[in-house]
Amino acid sequence: MKRPPDLRAWALPGARFNLRVTPRAGADSLEPGDDAGATIRIRITAPPEDGRANAAVQKLLGRALGVAPSRLRLISGASARDKLFQLD
């Protein structure tokens, strides 16, 4: 996987990220919106089974934000394509 876009400027404590996730994609990718409030589109190769897709999303988003994935908390959308993560 190539390096995701640099979103470190958005990595503020308490920041929330709206995501549209596509599991079982051909490759992992992240496409940010125009600003911090826009929906981020994430495509991941992991299947949506046993939380594997959510874990892959958390890892990819953490990498783009330059933070540890454990600092990202899934607020809503555990079993949906639209997810909301918060940076703690």
Image (tube, rainbow, N blue to C red):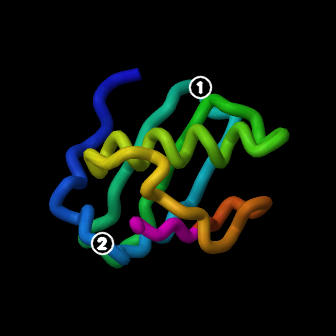
For the magenta stretch, what is the residue range? Answer: 84-88
Q: Quadrant of the C terminus?
A: bottom left
Which of 87 and 46 lies nearest the eye of the viewer? 87
Picture coordinates of residue 71, whole percent (x, y) = 43, 56
Q: Using residue 23 as the reference point, say whether residue 65 is left or right of it.
A: left
Picture coordinates of residue 10, whole percent (x, y) = 24, 65
Residue type highlighted by circle 1: Gly
The secondary structure that dominates the magenta segment is strand
Seen in the picture, residue 20 relative to 3 is either above or below; the reply is: below
Seen in the picture, residue 22 relative to 36 is either above or below; the reply is: above
Q: Residue at x 41, y 22 (%)?
A: 1
The circle drawn on residue 13 is 2
Q: Residue at x 58, y 36 (%)?
A: 44
Secondary structure under badge 1? loop
Q: Residue at x 65, y 48 (%)?
A: 54
Seen in the picture, residue 23 relative to 3 is either above or below; the reply is: below
Seen in the picture, residue 79 relative to 24 is either above or below; the reply is: below
Secondary structure under badge 2? loop
Across the whole image, how many numbered discs are drawn on residues? 2
Picture coordinates of residue 61, whole percent (x, y) = 42, 48
Q: Magenta segment: does it hold 35?
A: no
Q: Residue at x 34, y 57 (%)?
A: 32
Pointer 1 residue: 26
Label 2 crowd (10 A; few <14 / some 14-19 / many >=20): few
Residue type highlighted by circle 2: Pro
Picture coordinates of residue 14, whole percent (x, y) = 36, 77
Q: Using residue 2 as the reference point, say whether residue 43 is left or right of it.
A: right
Of the two numbered discs 2 and 1 on the same chain, state the one appearing first in sequence.
2
The image quarter in which residue 4 lies: top left
